Image (cartoon, helix red, strand yellow):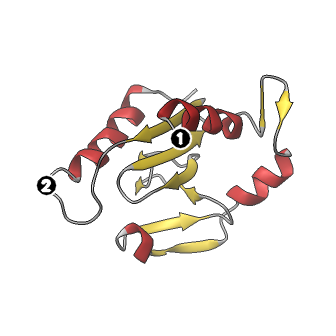
Amino acid sequence: STADELSRFAEILCRGGELDGVRVMRPETLAAATRQCRRLRPDVATGLAPIRWGTGFMLGSKRFGPFGRNAPAAFGHTGLTNIAVWADPQRALSVGIVSSGKPGPHPQAARYGALLDRINAEIPRG
């Protein structure tokens, strides 16, 4: 997928499961998938970073989360360090990121967190 395709999918999520008059998911299904079902705890899949989880998505937080700092309404999923897709209905924000990042300890890995923080800093809450 391209970043544009991922962000378009995130836009469907941000709009409650519908885009351009086409419903692909019921609002109740999306609400169930984004309801926290697992307590905040370190997760091997995220390099032991504490993450909140719904049944289908990683969930943002007020502190640092998979979608940057201070993004409690955000939800989506990451793919190690080279892809991320998320929606933040509080900001009317839909994001798709595709990079050539490498998983694990890498000199450029910190740039990913900086990118997430920059996106969140530039897009104010509505």
Marks 2 and 1, how far apart at CA? 26 Å
For disc 1, the marked residue is: 1
Residue at 35 percent across and 55 percent down: it is 81
Residue at 48 percent across and 34 percent down: it is 3
Discs 2, 1 touching: Cβ within 8 Å: no
Residue 33: percent from left, percent from top:
72, 59
**On the picture, is 104 further left or further right than 122?**
left
Compared with 85, 124 (above or below) is: above
Q: What element carries label 1?
A: loop
- The answer to whether residue 60 shows anywhere in this view is no
Question: Residue 17 appears in which quarter of the rendering?
Answer: top right
- The answer to whether residue 20 shows anywhere in this view is yes
**On the picture, is 113 further left or further right than 45?**
left
Residue type, label 2: Pro
**On the picture, is 66 further left or further right than 19?**
left
Quadrant location of the C terminus in the rendered image: top right
Disc 1 residue crowd, few under 14, some 14–19, many 20+, Cα 10 Å: few
Residue that lies at the very extreme toward the left in this rendered image: 107
Residue at 57 percent across and 33 percent down: it is 5
Residue 57: percent from left, percent from top:
61, 58
Dot 2 or dot 1: first in sequence order is 1
Disc 2 residue crowd, few under 14, some 14–19, many 20+, Cα 10 Å: few
Residue 39: percent from left, percent from top:
57, 74
Q: Which of 120 and 100 is in front in this view?
A: 100
Q: Is mark 2 on a helix, strand or loop?
A: loop
Question: Residue 91 appears in which quarter of the rendering?
Answer: top right
For disc 2, the marked residue is: 107
Residue that lies at the very extreme toward the top in this rendered image: 20
Residue at 30 percent across and 62 percent down: it is 103
Residue 98: percent from left, percent from top:
41, 41
